[in-house]
Image (cartoon, rainbow, N blue to C red):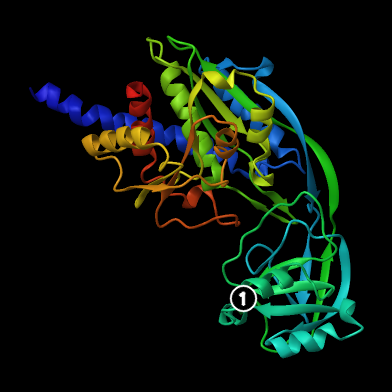
């Protein structure tokens, strides 16, 4: 009896520790300085792909395509040389105090600052003949006060309808987004504390270049008892470098990549075949607009009619507040089984549902009639598209629980 009790207590804890050790290993590697944010301008996506393929081979996961790789091309505006920005004589820190959006053009020079504090000042600036000598500065809090026309005015500022040399938006919560093509002006998000109370000039230096890149999806599988497929997916790419900083992308989406790889490792190590054939897709190009998953759907290496369900994992590094299932509202039977497993085992504190949305790699599948859900975790960890989404900050406090829930679901789903 004591031996049985020991096994009941010790074995689950041992499995959880092994899962977390493997997850830390994968996430630490994918977020390392060597991989520079797993994007295209530095070739780091290819370094990440080599590492992931090595792991798949190590655990005898079979290639779904020759060499595991499904190549495709994309365009990217690259800003990999150092970026410099001064307000008057004060140098600001890129990534911490400000972000330049990824579609910025090459620019170097000194410009005057014009703070737009109300609509009258906007109209006054729009009448100036020397607008290309100025960067306009807008406090996002002033935009929020304009309840009726807020969205219209904000869109006009984001598109630089006044044709200033550049736009600065003062906003404490900012996110970086890569872009495929550069625009004619730089858009800068800057923290309020970084902008002096009295400021007259900005000096800026940015070097940008549009390029076309070849990148790749990574595809493997484990043969099942039947040829109907469960497809488990995540994207492994991230934002890469912006000037002298890089974006590690621990939660987004080294965490999802690690979970897909560990689920594959789990089923590959079993002596018995899974009921379904399990396919694993690690997509590139998600951060550029779901490009890898879209390419997969448009050039499927498998018969999509044989795919019973796609489970997409994106940002699963927390979970202390539970998970959300996107497209869950249209899949009551799947959700019912997931909730039943969770209730029996007490894995997660909450399971919330959302309607389908084009916010991750499940979406191209749903648009072609393949059933797909997207799962992400919720919790106190809020780092997103910034330089602080690092492996050493990622809690992984419900990582093993979510993985075990999904493994049980795969075993029971019919």
* Outermost left residue: 1
Q: Nearer the viewer, residue 390 or 381?
A: 381
Q: x, y percentage for residue 258?
A: 50, 34
Specify the quadrant of the image occupied by residue 271.
top left
Q: Residue at x 53, y 47 (%)?
A: 357
Taking the image as drawn, is residue 242 in sight? yes
User: Toward which corner of the image does residue 162 lie, by quadrant?
Assistant: bottom right
Between 190 and 57, the one lying in front of the other is 190
Give the quarter of the figure containing the C terminus.
Answer: top left
Q: Where's residue 278, x and y in %?
A: 48, 20
Instruction: Return the residue found at the far right.
Output: 129
> In the displayed structure, does residue 337 sit left or right of residue 389?
left
Quarter of the image where one finds residue 124: bottom right
Q: Is residue 17 visible?
A: no
Does residue 206 appear to the left or right of 98 in the view shown? right
Q: Which residue occupies 76% across, 72% down?
A: 167
Up-down: is 386 above or below 287?
below
* Residue 36: x %, y % from top left: 67, 45
> Badge 1 is on which residue?
150
Image point (13%, 22%), residue name: 3
User: Regarding mark 1 in the picture, which secondary structure is present there?
Assistant: helix
Residue at the location (62% across, 29% down)? 51
Residue placed most toward the observer, 378 or 339: 339
Total labels: the figure holds 1
Whole-percent x, y for residue 411 in the image: 35, 22
Quadrant containing the N terminus is: top left
Mark 1 neighbour density, 10 Å: few (under 14) some (14–19) many (20 or more): few
């Amino acid at each position: 009896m004591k031996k049985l009790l020991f096994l009941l207590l010790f074995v689950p804890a041992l499995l959880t520790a092994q899962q977390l050790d493997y997850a830390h290993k994968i996430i630490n590697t994918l977020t390392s300085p060597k991989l520079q944010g797993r994007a295209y301008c530095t070739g780091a996506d290819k370094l990440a792909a080599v590492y992931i393929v090595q792991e798949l081979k190590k655990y005898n996961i079979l290639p779904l395509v020759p060499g595991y790789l499904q190549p495709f091309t994309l365009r990217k505006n690259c800003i990999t040389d150092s970026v410099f920005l001064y307000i008057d004589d004060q140098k600001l820190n890129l990534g911490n105090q400000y972000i330049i959006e990824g579609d910025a053009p090459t620019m170097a020079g000194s410009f005057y600052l014009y703070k737009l504090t109300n609509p009258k000042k906007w109209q006054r600036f729009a009448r100036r003949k020397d607008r290309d000598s100025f960067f306009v500065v807008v406090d996002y809090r002033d935009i929020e006060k304009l309840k009726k026309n807020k969205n219209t005015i904000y869109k006009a500022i984001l598109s630089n309808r006044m044709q200033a040399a550049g736009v600065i938006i003062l906003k404490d919560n900012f996110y970086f987004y890569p872009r495929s093509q550069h625009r004619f002006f730089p858009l800068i998000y800057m923290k309020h504390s970084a902008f002096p109370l009295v400021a007259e000039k900005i000096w800026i230096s940015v070097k940008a270049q549009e390029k076309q890149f070849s990148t790749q999806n990574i595809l493997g599988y484990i043969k099942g008892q039947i040829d109907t497929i469960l497809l488990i997916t995540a994207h492994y790419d991230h934002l890469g470098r912006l000037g002298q900083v890089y974006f590690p992308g621990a939660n987004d989406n080294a965490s999802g990549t690690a979970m897909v790889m560990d689920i594959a490792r789990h089923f590959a190590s079993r002596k018995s075949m899974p009921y379904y054939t399990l396919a694993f897709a690690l997509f590139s190009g998600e951060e550029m607009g779901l490009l890898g998953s879209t390419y997969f759907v448009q050039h499927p290496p498998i018969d999509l009619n044989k795919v019973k369900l796609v489970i997409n994992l994106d940002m699963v590094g927390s979970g202390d507040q539970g998970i959300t299932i996107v497209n869950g509202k249209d899949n009551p039977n799947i959700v019912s089984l997931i909730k039943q497993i969770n209730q029996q085992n007490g894995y997660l504190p909450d399971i919330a549902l959302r309607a389908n949305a084009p916010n991750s790699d499940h979406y191209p599948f749903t648009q072609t009639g393949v059933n797909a859900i997207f799962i992400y975790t919720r919790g106190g960890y809020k780092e997103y598209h910034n330089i602080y989404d690092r492996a050493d900050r990622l809690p992984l406090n419900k990582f093993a629980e979510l993985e075990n829930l999904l493994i049980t679901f795969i075993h029971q789903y019919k």
